[in-house]
Image: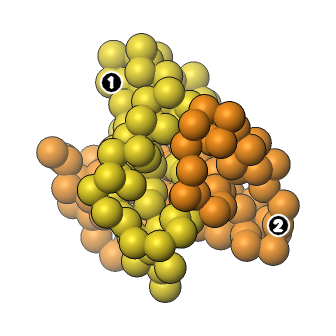
Chain colours: A orange, B yellow
């Protein structure tokens, strides 16, 4: 069954306190070499039937209205074949 | 600058109330055709220098110890070229 993935990330100019918290915790855990962390959301949508352009269009609308806040977040939609 | 992406998703056998809430909201917003939704987290890590196998190994350890809860979540690590 095809799966549509929606990635929602805070816009680059928006402060991301969750990402900053992870970034701050890494050195304390002994990790180095990471210069920035951003945390966002990932949605996996199982779609009945084929993923047509009309379906992707609908998913775009879902992402805009329900899954993300377009004022502070960007999103991407892509199709992933189920393993 | 290369970016390492860590996707963290609830394991299939684990109940996902956030995903269920989204799934329940879709028909109310006029969307149909989606049979299941799972919600997880996406981390984007900016790495200083090249992404070697040693770096990816470190990111795996970060994902295991800090970014995910291995009891209830699966994670994947992949390299993404910055746009």
The quarter holding residue B81 reads: bottom left
Residue B40: x and y in percent read: 51, 39
Asked if the residues shown at circle 2 and circle 1 are in contact, with their CB atoms under 8 angstroms apart, the answer is no
Residue B23: x and y in percent read: 52, 37
Please identify the residue farthest to the left as the structure is shown. Answer: A83
Q: CA distance from mark 2 to mark 1?
A: 32 Å
Q: On the picture, is A35 further left or further right than A49?
A: right
User: Considering the image in quadrants, where does the C terminus of chain A appear?
Assistant: top left
Dot 1: few (<14), some (14–19), or many (≥20) neighbours within 10 Å?
few
Q: Which residue lies under the disc numbered 1?
A: B12
Q: Nearer the viewer, mark 2 or mark 1?
A: 2
Name the residue nearer the viewer: B42 or A83.
Answer: B42
Residue A65: x and y in percent read: 69, 60
Q: Which residue lies under the disc numbered 2?
A: A14
* Residue appearing at x 50%, y 79% in the figure: B1
Q: Circle 2 — which element?
A: loop
Up-down: is B6 above or below B20?
A: below
Q: Circle 1 — which element?
A: loop
Q: Is residue A64 visible?
A: no
Q: Is residue A16 visible?
A: yes
* Residue appearing at x 33%, y 16% in the figure: B13
Could you tell me which chain the residue with mark 1 belongs to?
A: B
Could you tell me which chain the residue with mark 2 belongs to?
A: A
* Residue appearing at x 50%, y 27% in the figure: B65
Dot 2: few (<14), some (14–19), or many (≥20) neighbours within 10 Å?
few
């Amino acid at each position: 069954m095809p799966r549509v993935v929606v990635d929602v990330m805070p816009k680059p100019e928006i402060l991301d306190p969750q990402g900053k918290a992870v970034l701050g915790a890494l050195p304390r855990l002994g990790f180095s070499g990471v210069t920035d962390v951003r945390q966002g959301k990932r949605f996996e949508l199982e779609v009945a039937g084929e993923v047509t352009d009309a379906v992707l269009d609908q998913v775009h609308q879902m992402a805009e209205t329900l899954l993300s806040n377009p004022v502070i977040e960007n999103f991407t939609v892509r199709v992933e074949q189920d393993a």
